Amino acid sequence: QVQLVESGGGLVQAGGSLRLSCAASGSIFRLSAMGWYRQAPGKQREFVASITSYGSTNYADSVKGRFTISRDNAKNTLYLQMNSLKPDDTAVYYCNIINSRFWGQGTQVTVSS
């Protein structure tokens, strides 16, 4: 059974930075494209960023130039470096194995103005 566990969320002021981590169990991680999504209160879950098994990345327009997705296959861990945070980035952030039913439990990110 695959498990994804996010960490690293918290409260930060606008303009600040946070680094999210997603620890994955199982050998499927290094073979899988991975993604970060977020869901703000009252809104649908939305795509943030993704990375293929060989490191090709893709970003939502709203985070381009501010967020960086990366992965460490040796540690089975996915990362999201978030810089220049804005109040609009406030949401629960989830990691996901792309095109699978496997999601983490989420980590809360709150950006104060």
Image (tube, helix red, strand yellow):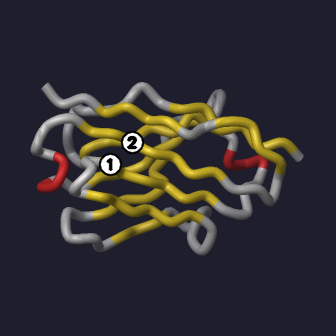
Check whether the beta carbons of the residues at disc 2 and disc 1 lie within 8 A of each other: yes
**Secondary structure category for the residue under label 1:** strand
Residue at mark 1: 77
Task: Indicate left or right for 103 with 8 as reference.
Answer: left
Coordinates of residue 89 in the picture (x, y in percent)? 68, 48
- Tell me the amino acid under the disc marked 1: Thr
Q: Is residue 61 above or below residue 46?
A: below
Crowd around label 2: few <14 · some 14–19 · many ≥20 (10 Å): many
Q: Is residue 102 above or below residue 15?
A: above
Q: Position of residue 14 (x, y in %)?
A: 82, 53
Q: Nearer the viewer, residue 84 or 18?
A: 18
- Would residue 1 be found to the left or right of residue 14 on screen? left
Q: State the CA–CA distance, disc 2 to disc 1.
A: 5 Å
> What residue is drawn where x is 20% and y is 39%?
100
Which dot marks residue 22?
2
Q: Residue at x 29, y 52 (%)?
A: 34
Q: Nearer the viewer, residue 81 or 47?
A: 81
Name the residue located 57 percent from the left edge and 34 percent from the top edge. Answer: 92
